[in-house]
Image (cartoon, helix red, strand yellow):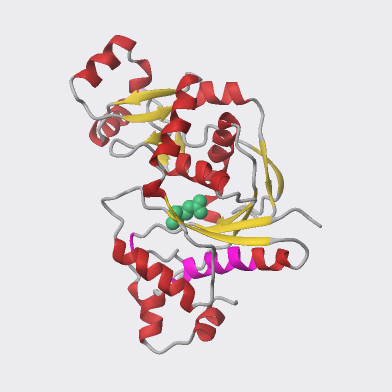
Amino acid sequence: MADMVVTRFAPSPTGYLHLGHAFAALTAFEAAKASAKSCDGRFVLRIEDIDRSRCRYEYEAAILDDLAWIGLSWEWPCLRQSERFEAYRAALASLNAQGLLYPCFCTRKDIAEEIARAVEAPHGPEGPHYPGTCRALSQEERARNIASGIPYAMRLDVTSAAARAGDLTFEEGGAGPNAERGTIKVEPNLFGDIVLARKDAPAAYHLAVVVDDAFQGVTLVTRGNDLFAATHVQRLLQALLGLPEPAYAHHRLILDEQGKKFSKRDSSVTLRALRERGATPEQTRKLIDF
Ligand code: GLU
């Protein structure tokens, strides 16, 4: 029997699910189901609700309801990231013990001003990299800032992290945005010194994802092409934390009539709105070729 395939869908409850989410969820679900024929496929759900200021319980309940409506079932209970802070703290402690983290006291304004001043500001898929201001602080300055109660995030010193991890690759079985496929060489520095713990929580997106993919036993990460770049840094974190390496299959994005990605503000294509207009699950699946 082939190895068990475990896929996942990991929405953030910051709005109602739209057709793009439905496509992502169905892709993960069908991948697990297809493999269940030859081995034991499992599909798990994860609610990515670290950002408490944007997440709402009402959206979480609607997500579960809409996913069931469109025909998905998943293992219970589903994982909520807001209940996983101890696991994220442990991962941060491990990276800290490796000397790869530093506290960052900058505000958004500080960062923007520093970037504007810089002669050369490296850019990544999400804009300019963090200019590294707080990486240069002495231990005394850090201790003084912390003691005086200045809020801080924790950032990864990506240059040291990449040196420690050495050369890495990941396996792409879908097709990345530029039709990348097969064994992909990791570019650890795509995003610069990323935040791994927010000022208001002991985690941030990339850290929580790798810790939870491992915890949930995910072996195949299916998700939209918009997260292809994120895989580079997530693979780096897996290596540093000694976590197992899932395979990846990024998929196309469902675009609106103007060729743009749906956003949570496009209320007309939410599953809620389609249901209210009388669409059946079958008709809805057809809209996205499922
Ligand atoms: N929570 C992320 C989102 O809603 C997805 C994370 C992932 O698939 O890795 O876009």
Placement of the C terminus among the 4 image quadrants: bottom right
Percent x, y of residue 261 = 45, 63
Does residue 80 appear to the left or right of 14 in the view shown? right
Query: What secondary structure is the stretch in magenta mostly built from?
Result: helix
Q: Is residue 208 visible?
A: yes
Q: Is residue 174 visible?
A: no
Hey, which residue is sitting farthest right in the picture? 1
The residue positioned 61% from the left and 26% from the top of the image is 165
> Count of labels shown?
0
Residue under the image location 44 percent in, 59 percent down? 11
- Among all residues in the image, which is located at the extreme front? 77
Q: Position of residue 54 (x, y in %)?
A: 28, 54
**In magenta stretch: residue 29:** yes
Quarter of the image holding residue 119? Answer: top left
Q: Is residue 10 above or below residue 144?
A: below
| Percent coordinates x, y for residue 240 in the rendering | 57, 29
Q: Quadrant of the N terminus?
A: bottom right
Answer whether residue 249 is magenta in the image.
no
User: Could you tell me residue 223's position as x and y percent?
Assistant: 55, 57
Q: Is residue 172 left or right of residue 282?
A: right
Residue placed most toward the observer, 42 or 224 = 42
Q: Quick one: which residue is furthest to the bottom in this view?
A: 278
Give the vertical position of 28 relative to 50 (above or below). Answer: below
Range drawn in magenta: 14-30
In this orientation, which residue lies closer to the viewer: 273 or 44?
Answer: 44
